[in-house]
């Protein structure tokens, strides 16, 4: 997995690529919780280039969301590929996360 | 649905002849290796594309649980995963030599209770029709997973 | 270059701790399974992309030869392939319980002599730096292949 | 591996896709030698969608070429991906086969 963080007119976008599994999610957790710790809001996470996610990856985002909610911050997940969206729906997390079709949709929301 | 060990098909145990078997160290970096193999074997078993992805995820989750619970994070042990294409579907057996699992403690969380964790077991059970621990194994655990073939209009 | 078994690195045999090992039936339909695994393991060993492809082909050729020569086409036997990421590179060991191979009979054809066959050994030896049969194995064969890491400007 | 045979103004094109290994090459051999046996010439073999070939696949084409040469027929290999071309070059068979960049190049040759 690769993580790239960029700035879009003052809003942070975290673009992920590759596979997020039990081996990779501690690294994701560190980067994500660092941004949450700095009260970065909104934070857009771009899933477009993510090819795989397991429950440890999902759990990391649930943790990130809880951290955001603690101070009223926003976590926005965007461009989730169909195979991965299916896992969010199955686990009823599509109702819990703020999900947008693209980075632009989220930035303009 | 969790069936007792002696009653997978209602009849005798299938033997593992013709099986493909892999042994990996119990380190998360080898999970991607198991995933690559699982996909290929599920394809050989004629599982449809979306099922292959669910099966790959399920086997990954089961191996992650072995590392977390049976081996308590020890990355220097061994995990054996056996794959067998059977007439009725696809069978995966996962073996460890770690702490014995008490099947009655294994339960995913209520999906309406949003918190990190508790998803893995749900992801395993939706991909496989049979989920059961071999009670006869003396040391460690043997988890047997079976996915049956569906008729054309079933799911 | 074919080194004697006891002299791979000039020193002791590396043990296979931390190795990934797969067992397949000696049927050509499982070769694609070995290829998927070989690629993944060569990537874990940090082999560059074009080398990964050459290594995948080489391991496939070596397994094909086991089916053809050690097992004489019998598809119901077993082949074991072990992969190990070592400090100096990547090691693959291929074991069978078939007819003993006489290494002196193994030779690719002269590449200028165009005829079907005789390419496999060339494809194995260009991908691996070490190609050697374990003379101490009692029944069957154990072929050890090692690919060393290159410096930045080497090939 | 999949084999599709089509007719381009009377010339046969055999389009291959997928992996050609020891498991698949007996099927390739059967189809190829059937066309050679019918003295189909020229025969264009399209490699564009071939993702993998091993020495048993290469040997099958050497056998096809020998069969063609026996009656003065032509075997044309086209659109060979770089990774596969590399194997033909390594085995010095790029000098032996008639190789073209595309189906059209071969048909117009
Ligand atoms: N192989 C196992 N051995 C022992 N306990 C297990 C095993 N797999 C799962 N469990 C138990 O079942 C619970 C649910 O597992 P799971 O759904 O994978 O979620 P998580 O691992 O994220 O908690 C775990 O918290 C654990 O207590
Ligand atoms: N594992 C093996 N056991 C015994 N003989 C072998 C083995 N591998 C290769 N050989 C011998 O070496 C020769 C060259 O092998 P190879 O280059 O793979 O070409 P091919 O198998 O197409 O003839 C074979 O014809 C065979 O006689």
Image (cartoon, coloured by chain):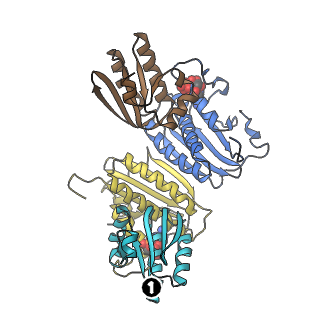
Chain colours: A cyan, B yellow, C blue, D brown
Q: Residue furthest front?
A: A9
Q: Which residue is mark 1?
A: A73
Residue D80 seen anywhere in this rendered image of the structure: yes
The vertical placement of B152 against B136, above or below, is: above
Residue lying at 57% horizontally and 60% vertically, measured from the top left: B29
Q: Residue furthest left?
A: B153
Nearer to me, A15 or C35: A15
- Specify the quadrant that holds the C terminus of chain B: bottom left
Instruction: Tell me where residue B146 sits by quadrant.
Output: bottom left
Instruction: Tell me where residue D49 sits by quadrant.
Output: top left
- Specify the quadrant that holds the N terminus of chain B: bottom left
Give the percent coordinates (x, y) of residue D89: 56, 29
User: Label 1's element?
Assistant: loop
Q: Residue furthest right?
A: C10
Give the percent coordinates (x, y) of residue C68: 51, 29
The vertical placement of A70 against D16, above or below, is: below
Nearer to me, C9 or A100: A100
């Amino acid at each position: 997995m690769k993580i790239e963080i960029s700035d879009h007119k003052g809003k942070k976008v975290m673009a992920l690529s590759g596979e997020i599994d039990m081996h990779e999610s501690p690294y994701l957790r560190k980067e994500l919780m660092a941004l949450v710790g700095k009260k970065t809001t909104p934070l857009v996470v771009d899933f477009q280039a993510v090819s795989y996610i397991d429950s440890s990856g999902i759990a990391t985002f649930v943790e990130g969301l809880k951290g955001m909610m603690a101070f009223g911050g926003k976590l926005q997940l965007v461009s989730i590929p169909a195979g991965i969206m299916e896992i969010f729906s199955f686990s009823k997390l599509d109702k819990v996360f703020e999900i947008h079709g693209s980075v632009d949709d989220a930035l303009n929301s | 649905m969790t069936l007792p060990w002696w009653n997978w098909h209602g009849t005798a145990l299938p033997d593992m002849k013709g099986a493909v078997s892999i042994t990996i160290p119990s380190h998360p970096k080898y999970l991607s290796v198991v995933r690559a193999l699982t996909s290929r074997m599920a394809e050989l078993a004629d599982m449809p594309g979306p099922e292959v992805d669910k099966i790959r995820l399920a086997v990954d989750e089961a191996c992650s649980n072995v590392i977390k619970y049976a081996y308590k994070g020890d990355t220097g042990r061994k995990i054996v995963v056996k794959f067998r294409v059977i007439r009725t579907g696809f069978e995966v057996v996962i073996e460890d030599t770690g702490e014995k699992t008490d099947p009655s403690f294994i339960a995913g969380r209520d999906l309406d209770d949003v918190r990190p964790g508790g998803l893995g077991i749900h992801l395993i059970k939706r991909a496989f029709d049979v989920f059961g621990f071999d009670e006869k194994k003396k040391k460690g655990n043997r988890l047997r997973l079976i996915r049956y073939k569906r008729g054309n209009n079933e799911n």
